[in-house]
Image (tube, grey):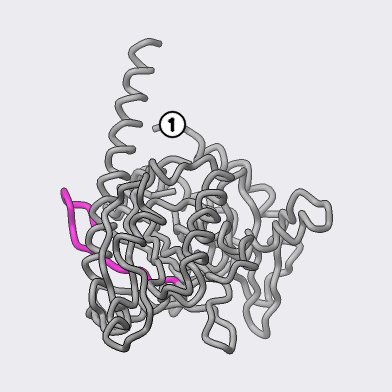
């Protein structure tokens, strides 16, 4: 649930990085955290197990500047990717305004990507949300491994597996090196803010219309 | 789940309630958050407390505990309380979508905090559900 605080003149949106285990969701957040100046970001909060895997979620609040005199504050969350953390992922999705689906380009992770996308759709459904209606961006991560001679899925294969019907924008990335990280963030932020603003304006118009009838 | 809008007047009214009912009995900090982890309004001494992280963790904590409740056949646990050496924290669900987080020292009796929080819950809910 996005929050528009007219007292502080701020808009708060929640963007969740979703995807299978070890695909690089937390790496995205780490890269953003290290690259953005302190003025524009809050503390990076991580809850992870000893093996560097996210246990609950990571959170990074960032400030994207002003639109129409309102400060845009985005909270970036990640979910734990391993399939047995389904209940936790559902909790983190509560009130989501935008989604980045990070897919693993490794060929052997193909099934995991597909499973994770189905899991995302199911979890959203339980909140009465549809992936098709939410701001969504795909990130095809680990593209740099092609140079290391590791079998990767082609972009066409990834698109066909995941994005055939959704037709969301996608970015090729190597999150460890920061390639594609900000492009993804910029696109999802733009889409999310637009979505939240449109919903707000629609609600206002709806309320006024209701007032008129009464 | 739509977009929640809080106006300056609403923030003032909510803060007034938190001040009069909770800060008046010595609570150090009272934060009203939504279940997505957004801070709606905070009243009291925020010194050194990262309210953004606190709100995200409190919402997650509440969600996780609700799942535990379901495993036991309960709807949810409406009250959570953690005791520290110096500070204590108390979480109460307000309606369906909100959580009131209260931080207080050992000098304030838990019973008094619980009583006041219960009294204040309906008042906050009324303010939150009013249309602007």
- Could you tell me which quadrant the C terminus of chain A lies in? top left
Residue A39: x %, y % from top left: 23, 76
Can you say whether A213 is above or below A121 in the image? above
Residue shown at the point (72%, 54%) measured from the top left: B78
Magenta stretch containing residue B32, yes or no?
A: no
Name the residue carrying label 1.
B131
Residue A7: x %, y % from top left: 31, 50
Tell me: A213 left or right of B91.
Answer: left
Residue A191: x %, y % from top left: 26, 50
User: Number of callouts in the render?
Assistant: 1
Q: What kind of secondary structure does the magenta stretch mostly adopt?
A: strand
Q: Mark 1 lies on which chain?
A: B
Camera-side residue of A49 and B74: A49
Tell me, yes or no, if residue A33 can be seen here: no
Residue shown at the point (24%, 71%) measured from the top left: A180
Camera-side residue of A168 and B112: A168
Q: Residue furthest right?
A: B72
Camera-side residue of A150 and B81: A150
Residue shown at the point (66%, 65%) measured from the top left: B90
Tell me: A158 left or right of A53.
Answer: left
Magenta stretch containing residue A70, yes or no?
A: yes
Can you say whether A81 is above or below A198 in the image? below
Task: Name which quarter of the figure residue A144 lies in.
Answer: bottom left
Can you say whether A205 is above or below B82 in the image? above
Tell me, yes or no, if residue B65 can be seen here: yes
Q: Magenta residues, as a range?
A: A59-71
Camera-side residue of B3 and A108: A108
Tell me: A179 left or right of A131.
Answer: left
Task: Name which quarter of the figure residue A76 lies in.
Answer: bottom left
- Circle 1 Cα neighbour tier, 10 Å, few/some/many (<14 / 14–19 / ≥20): few
């Amino acid at each position: 649930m996005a929050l528009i605080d007219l007292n502080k003149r701020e808009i708060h949106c929640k963007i969740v990085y979703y995807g299978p285990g070890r695909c690089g969701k937390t790496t995205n957040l780490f890269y953003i955290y290290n690259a953005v100046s302190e003025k524009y970001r809050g503390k990076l909060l991580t809850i992870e197990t000893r093996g560097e895997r996210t246990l609950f979620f990571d959170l990074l609040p960032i400030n994207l500047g002003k639109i129409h005199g309102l400060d845009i504050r985005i909270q970036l969350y990640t979910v734990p990717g391993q399939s047995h953390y389904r209940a936790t992922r559902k909790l983190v999705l509560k009130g989501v305004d935008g989604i980045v689906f990070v897919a693993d380009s490794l060929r052997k992770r193909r099934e995991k990507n597909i499973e994770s996308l189905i899991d995302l759709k199911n979890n959203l459904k339980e909140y009465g949300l549809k992936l098709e209606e939410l701001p969504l961006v795909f990130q095809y991560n680990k593209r740099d491994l092609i140079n290391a001679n590791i079998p990767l899925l082609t972009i066409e294969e990834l698109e066909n597996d995941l994005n055939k019907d959704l037709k969301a924008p996608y970015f090729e990335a190597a999150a460890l090196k920061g390639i594609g990280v900000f492009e993804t963030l910029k696109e999802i932020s733009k889409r999310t803010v637009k979505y939240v603003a449109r919903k707000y304006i629609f609600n206002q118009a709806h309320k006024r219309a209701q007032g008129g009838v009464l | 789940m739509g977009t929640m809008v809080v106006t300056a007047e609403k923030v003032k009214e909510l803060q007034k309630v938190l001040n009069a009912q909770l800060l008046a009995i010595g609570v150090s900090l009272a934060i009203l958050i939504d279940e997505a982890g957004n801070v709606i309004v905070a009243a009291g001494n925020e010194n050194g407390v990262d309210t953004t992280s606190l709100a995200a963790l409190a919402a997650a904590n509440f969600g996780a505990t609700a799942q535990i409740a379901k495993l036991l056949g309960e709807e949810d646990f409406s009250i959570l309380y953690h005791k520290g050496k110096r500070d204590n924290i108390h979480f109460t669900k307000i309606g369906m979508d909100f959580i009131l987080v209260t931080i207080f020292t050992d000098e304030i009796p838990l019973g008094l905090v619980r009583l006041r929080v219960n009294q204040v819950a309906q008042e906050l809910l009324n303010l939150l559900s009013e249309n602007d």
